[in-house]
Image: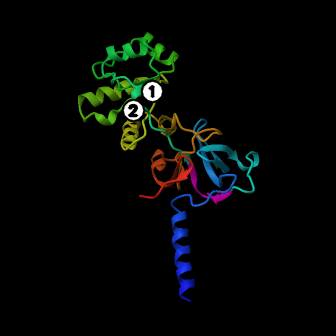
Amino acid sequence: MMKKANYASVATVCLAACTLVTCWTGPDGIALIAGRLLDSSTMVIVEDSIVLVNGTFVKASGHRSITPLPAAAEKIDMKGKYIVPLPRAIDEKELDSPANTMEKMVEQATIRRQLIVGVPLDSTEWERHIIALIRAQRTQIIPQLWKLAAGAQLDTAKRNLKILVSENIGIVVAPGPHAEAELALLAQCGMDTKQLIQAYLRIANLNAGSDANLAVVSANPLDDWRNMFKIERSMVGGKWQVAK
C-alpha cells in the first residue's frame, strides 16, 4: 500500500509539472488544436486553428481544414483560448542613439536606417521630403514615449507621433517591461487597437518556419489590445515557460 501511495504522489507531481513545462513531446512535435489564432499579418482571428511546433520552430499553422495534423504529435486542446505570437527582442546594437531632434531624425533617415529610435522633441515642423523619404525606405520608428516625463517634451513627442501615424509611417513597440505603458501612450496619439497590436507584433508571426514563440490568452486582443498581456502560459523556442 505504501508503494502505491508513493507512486500516486510522484504521478501527481509530474502531472502538475507538465502544466508548466514540456515534459514530453511526440515524435512529430506539439500540436495546439482548436484554438483561435491571431494572424498578425492580416489582423484576423483564425478560428479552429492548428499550430504545429517541431523543435524550436513552427512547422505549420492555420485553419484545421488546411493544416495537416500528424498522428504522432502531442496534442494540446486550445478550445476557447487565443494564440498570439510573441515578439522577439530587438538587438540594440542595430540601433543608433535616439533621434530626439529634427536634425538627428533627418540625418538617420538620410543614411537609410531601417529602425529609428525616438521622435523629435524640438519641433513638430516636418518637411514633406523627409516624410516621403521615411515612407519610401520603409523606415520604422521606435518612439519610446515611456521614457519621457509628463510635460512639454512628452506633448511634443505625441504631436509628432500623431503626424507620423497619419502619414502611415510604421511604428514599433519594443518588447519588454515597458511595452504595455508604451502602447497606452501610443493610444493617446490616435492609434486604434489594430494599429497598436501591429506595432507590438510587427516583427512577430507564427507562420511556417518562424520561431515557436507564442502566448496563450483567454480574451480576444482585437477587442482590447491589453488582452495580449493577460497571458495564461507562454512558449519560447518551442518550450513552455515555467509560470512565475
Quadrant including the N terminus: bottom right
Q: In the image as oriented, which residue stretches furthest toward the bottom?
A: 1
Quadrant including the C terminus: bottom left
Colour basis: rainbow
Q: Nearer the viewer, residue 145 or 128?
A: 145
Of callouts 1 and 2, the N-terminal one: 1
Label 2 secondary element? loop
Check disc 1 and report the residue beneath it. 165
Apparent side of residue 45 relative to residue 95 in the rendered image (left or right): right
Picture residue at 28% right of the left edge, 31% below the top: 154
Magenta part of the chain: 74-83
Apparent side of residue 213 relative to residue 191 in the rendered image (left or right): right
Percent of width and height locating residue 165: 45, 27
Label 1 secondary element? helix
Percent of width and height locating residue 34: 66, 55
Contact? badges 1 and 2 (CB < 8 Å):
yes
Picture residue at 54% right of the left edge, 84% below the top: 5
Q: Please, what is the dominant secondary structure of the magenta stretch? A: strand
Q: Quadrant of residue 187?
A: top left
Picture residue at 48% right of the left edge, 50% below the top: 227
Callout 2 amino acid? Cys
Q: Nearer the viewer, residue 2 or 67?
A: 2
Is 186 above or below relative to 224?
above
Check disc 2 and report the residue beneath it. 189
Apparent side of residue 140 relative to residue 101 in the rendered image (left or right): right
Q: CA distance from mark 1 to mark 2?
A: 8 Å
Q: Nearer the viewer, residue 150 or 113?
A: 113
Percent of width and height locating residue 16: 52, 68
Callout 1 amino acid? Val
